[in-house]
């Protein structure tokens, strides 16, 4: 949704922008191209490999970008370190990147048999292995139910995971889920039967919802009057968190620009089927009195 993100972020020459989820740098590149390189982008990502790749992808604009291996939750300390008080806009494109899903040894994908890792940051002490082996059965069921949207089978799956311990690889997790689900349920599912469980564990490992909620409420203080906050989410819980936080700040700090979330165009769905569940919400910083 690069096109839609730019439409709402509205990058201007001489502006300062935060790309809080840099990834490979595609959004940052689009911001720089839209301003002919005459703005400044501060790019943050938890993932060291993403930073390295973005650095190379953005080489043509190296004078206009500053990249940090950091959580977007720490955007305020990054701004402080650069002596910046306020920015013209903040963009978040949440979730996992293709680089992480396809990368070797990261443990994000049910398609490979790898150690249960799923950390976006190698500094995170908690891995997927910690969660599947140490959480109690009821804690696991809650994670799978809430973060995986696995409403009917969360308890069954958590029981099978506990029974199978110790789980060491993504293959172990896939087979615990396979054993927990009735065969007709596996056949019926449009997506891989372990998708929801993998999503749930990944969100828990990286504390994704909590980070989002904590960060969104602090962001408007650091956005100039008329500046924009744009968030793309991939999960109903994330979208709900964005909607609710925007609503809490509505009229006092933010003017909401998207009554309903913006979804990918037909064309994007064809070229990038993974964007299917993407939702974009945008808001503008209300002028301070
Ligand atoms: C969907 S990808 C972003 C892709 C990016 N917009 C691009 O153009 O290539 C999400 C990225 O956000 C990063 N990420 C997730 N949570 C983060 C956080 N709390 N702070 C910083 N980066 C985060 C992930 O490591 C991943 O690289």
Image: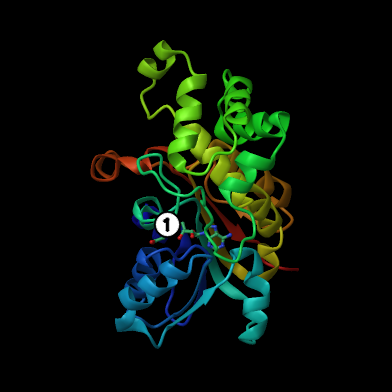
Residue that appears at 51% across and 40% down: 199
Residue that appears at 68% across and 48% down: 245
Q: Is residue 113 toward the left or the right of residue 66 in the image?
A: left
Pointer 1 residue: 5
The picture quadrant where one finds residue 150 is: top right
Q: Is residue 59 toward the left or the right of residue 163 in the image?
A: left
Residue that appears at 48% across and 21% down: 179
Viewer-nearest residue: 93 or 182 = 182
CB of residue at label 1: within 8 Å of ligand 1? no
Instruction: Count how many numbered circles sit on residues in the image.
Output: 1
Which percent across, then down, holds residue 80? 67, 82
Above or below — where is 173 with respect to 212?
Answer: above
Viewer-nearest residue: 173 or 272 = 173
Asked if residue 260 shows in the view, the reply is: no
Colour setup of the view: rainbow
Which percent across, then down, holds residue 40? 46, 80
Which type of secondary structure does the marked residue at label 1 adopt?
Answer: helix
Mark 1 packing: few (<14 Cα in 10 Å), some, or many (20+)?
A: many
Which percent across, then down, holds residue 45? 51, 67
Viewer-nearest residue: 13 or 104 = 104
């Amino acid at each position: 949704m690069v096109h839609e993100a730019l439409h709402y972020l509205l990058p201007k020459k001489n502006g300062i922008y935060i790309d809080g989820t840099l990834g490979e740098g595609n959004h940052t590149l689009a911001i720089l191209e839209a301003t002919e390189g005459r703005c400044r982008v501060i790019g943050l990502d938890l993932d060291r490999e993403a930073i390295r790749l973005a650095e190379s992808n953005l080489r043509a604009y190296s004078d206009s970008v500053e990249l940090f291996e950091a959580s977007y939750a720490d955007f305020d300390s990054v701004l402080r370190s650069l002596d910046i008080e306020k920015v013209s806009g903040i963009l978040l494109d949440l979730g996992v990147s293709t680089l992480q899903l396809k990368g070797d040894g990261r443990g994000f994908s049910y398609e490979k048999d790898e150690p249960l890792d799923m950390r976006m940051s190698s500094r995170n002490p908690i891995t997927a292995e910690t969660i599947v082996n140490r959480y109690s059965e009821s804690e696991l069921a809650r994670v799978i139910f809430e973060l995986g949207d696995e409403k009917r089978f969360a308890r069954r799956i958590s029981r099978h995971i506990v029974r199978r311990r110790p789980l060491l690889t993504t293959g172990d997790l896939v087979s615990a889920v396979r054993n927990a689900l009735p065969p007709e349920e596996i056949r019926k599912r449009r997506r891989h039967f372990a998708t929801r469980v993998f999503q749930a564990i990944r969100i828990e490992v990286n504390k994704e919802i909590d980070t989002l909620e904590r960060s969104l409420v602090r962001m408007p203080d650091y956005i100039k009057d008329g500046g924009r906050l744009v968030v793309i989410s991939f999960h109903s819980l994330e979208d709900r968190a964005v909607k609710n936080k925007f609503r809490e700040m509505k009229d006092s700090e933010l003017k909401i620009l998207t009554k309903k979330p913006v979804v990918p165009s037909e064309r994007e769905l064809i070229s990038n089927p993974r964007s299917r569940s993407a939702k974009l919400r945008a808001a503008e910083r209300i002028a301070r009195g």
